[in-house]
Amino acid sequence: MTEITIALDRYDRHVPLFLGAVEPPRGLRYRALEVGMVPPRRDGIDRHGRMLKGLEFDAAEVSLASYIMAKQRGLPLVGVPVFPRRLFSQNHIFVNRGAGIRKPSDLKGKRVGLWAFQVTMSVLAKGDLKSFYGVPWEEIRWVTQHPEEIGWSADGLAVERAPEGRLLADMLVDGEIDGFIHPHPPAVVQERTDRVGRLFEDTEAECARYASARGYYPIMHLIAVKEERVRERPSLPRELMALCDEAKRLAYDFYHDPGYALVAFGRNAYERQCGTLGADPWKTGVSANRRNLEQFIDYMVDQRLIKTRVAVESLFDRSVLET
């Protein structure tokens, strides 16, 4: 019997795994751990660091950008083309209402806060600003809150750390920075609508426009597995894909009940999403996500996070390359 731990955040598509509702294949037993990046979580936080630095879990959901950097440095992990977190950058760009920012080009020369320079949302937003909106990230002054997950030098770039003891969210509200990009926007950013707003007034429409033009819902995370566990059980990457696909199928079924979510019109939002993004914007597999992955790799090269372009195939176990 092969027993594995898999660290995941508490998303609806993971609930069936936490409940043990997804039957594993013969000879495999899994234990789903609820490990997030911000508290509270049942099994702790700092999932990316615990996996990418400490190799604490057999498999884990990890940041795409940090995984690519770690993989290039020889970390003994292989990727599985399951992408459990996706976000549009347009929904995560906030501005101080007094900064005179009404459109992306107004960000030029402004001070914009980031969790860290190499965080996947940071990479996506900087890349989108440059390639989709014509606003070079080099013309923005970046302020980071946290150390980089994977060691990297920002020498020669307009990047500074926030003052000791100051939170970027509070700095945005107080007008000390002009903009803020964050994958988990703090409550104060979303509650202080008198001082803070999103860059795009009709954010949902802008995200839909982007999805139509690019043809994907941007990837934030993928599943990474220890190489040693794959050597022990070569079928593990494909088995993990099947487990996650079944969990996703069960999660979609939750939304057949109009009263499932705390969001009163959750079912209506789901139907609207199907019309905008298609029946399943969460597709697994290499081929269905190649365009997204190639674009993101280009962003990382342009932002000097990796020196040369890497092949999409190099990110994943060879057993899943034909998916």
Image (cartoon, rainbow, N blue to C red):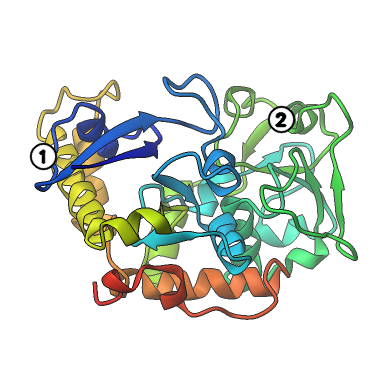
Residue shown at 45% from the left, 31% from the top: 35
Q: Quadrant of the image for the N terminus?
A: top left
Q: Residues within 10 Å of mark 1 (few under 14, many from 20)?
A: some
Q: Can you say whether 275 is above or below 31 in the image?
A: below
Residue shown at 17% from the left, 41% from the top: 252
Tell me the residue that label 1 is attached to.
23
Q: Is residue 32 left or right of residue 141?
A: left
Which of 127/161 is in front? 161
Which of 12/171 is in front? 12
- For badge 1, the amino acid type reads Glu
Residue 12 in sight in this render = no
Which of 239/89 is in front? 239
Which of 264/249 is in front? 249
Image-quadrant location for residue 292: bottom left
Q: Can you say whether 46 is above or below 243 in the image?
A: above
SS assignment at label 1: loop
Q: Residues within 10 Å of mark 2 (few under 14, many from 20)?
A: many
Q: Quadrant of the image for the C terminus?
A: bottom left
Residue shown at 66% from the left, 56% from the top: 103
Residue 204, label in figure: none
Q: Can you say whether 221 is above or below 316 in the image?
A: above
**Where does the image place residue 120, in percent across and percent down from the top left?**
57, 54
**Where does the image place residue 100, in percent across and percent down from the top left?**
77, 46
- For badge 2, the amino acid type reads Ala
SS assignment at label 2: helix
**Where does the image place residue 282, in percent across and percent down from the top left?**
29, 55
Tell me the residue that label 2 is attached to.
169
Q: Is residue 208 left or right of residue 185?
A: left
Marks 1 and 2, Cα distance to the nearest angstrom? 42 Å
